Image: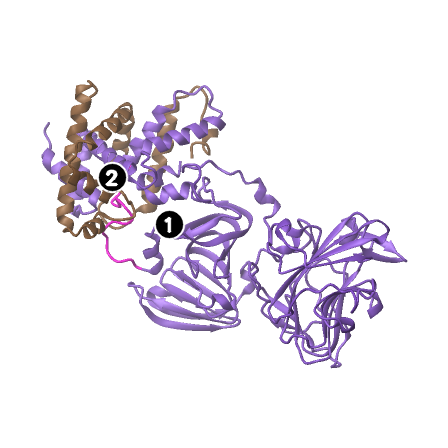
Chain colours: A brown, B purple
Amino acid sequence: MLWREHKSFELGTNFVKWVSVIAHHQVQRYRRERRRVGPQLSDTVVDLLTHDAVERVDLLESRRDALRGCLKKLSDADRLLVEQCYGDSRRSFKTSAEHLGRPANTVYKALIRIRRALYECIERTLAMEGLS
Amino acid sequence: MTRAVSQHELQRMVGEFCHGTLAEADGALLDKVLEKDIEARQFYNNYMFLHAELYAQHANVGCQSAVESLERRAAEMEAVSPFAARPARLPWLAIAAALVGVAIGSSWLTYWASTSGPASSTVAQSAKNGVDRSLPVAKITATRNCLWTDPLSDVGFGSTLYGGQQLSLAAGLIEVTFLDGAQVVVEGPAKFDVQDAGLGELHEGRIAAVVPVRARGFEIATNGLNVVDLGTEFGVLADGEDTEVHVFRGLVMAHVLDAQGRPIRTVELNTAEAARITPASSMVARIPARDDAFVRSLSTVSGPHDGLYAYEDFNYPEGPLAKQNGGFGWAGAWFSVESVDPAGDTNHVVAGGLEYKGMVPLTGRAVQSGQQNRIRRALSTSIGGVFDAAGLVENQDGTRLIGHEGTTVYLSFLQRVDKTDDIFYGLELHRADGNPNRVLCIGNGAEQCGYGVTSNFNIYGLQNFPSLGEENTDTNFIVVKITYGPGNRDRVAVYRNPESLVDESACVVDAELVGNFAFDRISLGNFNGTKVHEVDEIRVGTTFLAVTGRRSRGPDRLMRRMAVLDAPGSPSGAGVASAADQSWPVRLLAIW
C-alpha cells in the first residue's frame, strides 16, 4: 500500500504523518467495506482513536514485549483457553466454546478476566520500566 | 477521572465488543464515552492492541506478531523504496500496528466468523470459510492482462488454488481449470472463489464455464443461486441482486435458494436459453442467450502468437465442415476432396470438443462418418503469409512448402475412432492432393499397415512403418515434431499421449522417421469399414509448448510480482493469502 502511494509523498515533509494518513484511510475503507448491521463506533471516535494511537505509538513495542512476558504468567488452563480461542481466527469464540464443551458465556467471561489480567500485568511491567 | 461509566463497566463493554456480543445501547454508550474521555480512548487502544496481539501471537502463521509481520514487510520495502533518507522504520510500523487495534474495535465485526445470524446465501456462508491449504482444487491455466484487486497478490499464471481461496480480479481475464476438468474463464472485475474441485462461487462479475462429461455436476454458486451443470458450456453474470445464466450448449439446472440456502425453485435451461434470476424475489425472466457477451476461452485467439502459427478448433455450427474457414494460419476453407454423399455431410462438425486430460473440450470437433471421405485444408504458405513470415517456407519443385532447412515445426491434434482395426483412417500431411503426395499419415490401415505412422512420399509402408502401439478407442493426443535438415533429410518424432504437456524432454518418442517431410496442407481421411473418425484441436507451431496448450500472453509478463508476507517455503500462492486467511490483524496488514 505504502509502495503504491509513494508518489504522493514529498521529500522533506513529515513521513510519519504521511504514513498515518494513509493508514487511517485504509482503516476507514476497511470499515466501510466490512460494515454490517450492529453498533459501530462513529467516524469521529475512530478519528480520535487513530490520533491517540499515533501519539502513543512509541510504546507499542514495549507493550508487545510485556505481553509476551505476561502470557507466561498465566495458568496452564488460562493459557490453553487463549490458545484455543485465538489460535484460529476463522473460528468464533462461540465455536471455540463449543469445541471446549463449555457454555459460550463462561468462555466470554473467562476471556474478559484473562485480558484484564494481561492488561494489568502489562501496565505493571511498563510502570516498572518507567514507561507508563 | 469523571466518567459516565466505571472502569469495570468500560472493561466489560470493550470486552464484549471484542466478542461481538455488545448490545446496541451499550455500543452507543461506549461511543459516547470514547468521544469524551481521552483516558477511555487510551484504555480502548491498549486493550485492542492486546486483543490484536493475542491473535497475532497465537495465529497459525508461525506465531508471528502483527508488528513482526510489518517489520518483514518493511525490510522488503526498504530494498525497493525510494525513501533512502527516511526516518527509522519503526514509527510507521508501530502506527500501523496501532491502527490495526483501532480497526479491530472500531467496527462491529470483530471477526467475520463471529456469532452473527445465519448466512443469507451459499456465497455469504462460504466467504467465512478459510483457505484449506491441504486441498488443492484448481490451477490458473491462463491469464490475459489481469490486474488483481490486491496488488500484493501472489496469485498468477500457474498458481495452484486451494479450497476456499478467493480471487479478486480488478481487470483482465484468468482461466481457472478445476481438478475435475471444468474450466472457468473469469472476466474482471470479478470476485470468484474456488471451493472444491467441483464448486466455484461467483460473488460478482462474469464467468464462462466449460464442463467436460467427467466433471458433470460442477456447480457455480452466486448469491441465492446454485447453477448445476450437466455436461455443457454456460456463462454466469452476477450483478448485484440479479444473476444471469446463459447456456451455450447442453443443459444446466439453476436452483434458486432461500435465506437458509435451501432450494425453493429450479430453472432448467437448455442450449441457447438464458434467464435473469432475482433470488430475493424468486423472479425468473427469460432472456435471449448471448454467447458474445462472455469470453469463453483464452485459447481462442485471433492470430498467430507465441510460436503457434496455425490453429483449428472447429468452432463452427453443427453441419458440413466443407467451406468452413475459421481458426488462423490457413490459406482457405476446408475442401472436401472425397465424400460418399454428394453434399459432403459425412465430413461434418459436431458440437463439443474431444476430451483429453489436461485439455478442456471447447466448441466443436470434426467427424468423418462416411467411409470414402477425405477433406483437406491448405496452410498459409504464400509469399508474405503466416508461415513465410516466420521463415518456415521453402520452394521445392515450384511448390511452396513448410519445411525450410534448419527449422523445426510441431504439429498436434486430438484423434479418436469408435472402432479399432477397421481399415483406414488418418490425419495426413500432404504436399499436394493425392496419395503419392502424402508425406505423413497418423492413423491406421494406410497401405495395409496397422496403427502407426506411414509416408507414401518417403516410402514408409507395410515393411518399415513405425507403430504407435496398441490402437484404442480413446482420445489420443498426438504431437509430431519435424526437424528440417539439409538436403531434405528431415527427421520426424511422434509422441502419442506425451508424458508431459510442458516439458518435451520428459516425453518418450513413440515413432521416428527420416525423409522429406515438407508439406503445405492437412487432410483427414476415413475409408472403408464402419468406424467414425474424429479430430479436434489442430495446431501447427514452432515449439512444443505452442502446440500443447494455452500459455500466458505477453502483457502478463510485465506484471511485477510483489513481495509476500509469509515465510519462504510456503506453498505457491500461499504468500499474502495464507497469512491473511489465518489472522484478522494480519489480514488487514495485507492491504498495505
Instruction: Residue B131: give its label.
Output: 1
Q: Residue at x 15, y 37 (%)?
A: A114
Is B471 positioned to the left or the right of A112 in the image? Answer: right
Residue B70 lies in the magenta-colored region: no
Q: Quadrant of residue B255?
A: bottom left
Asked if B379 appears above or below A102 in the picture, the reply is below
User: Horizontal and vertical percent for residue B73?
Assistant: 41, 32
Dominant SS of magenta comes to: loop
Q: Tell which of B413 and B480 is nearer to you.
A: B480
**Residue type marked 1:** Val
Q: Quadrant of residue B319?
A: bottom right
For label 2, the SS is helix
Label annotation for residue B105: 2
Q: Are marks 1 and 2 in contact (CB under 8 Å)?
A: no
- Range of magenta residues: B102-120
What is the CA distance from the residue labelled 1 to the residue labelled 2? 25 Å
Q: Nearer the viewer, mark 1 or mark 2?
A: 1
Q: Position of residue B98 (x, y in %)?
A: 29, 31
Image quadrant assignment for residue B197: bottom left
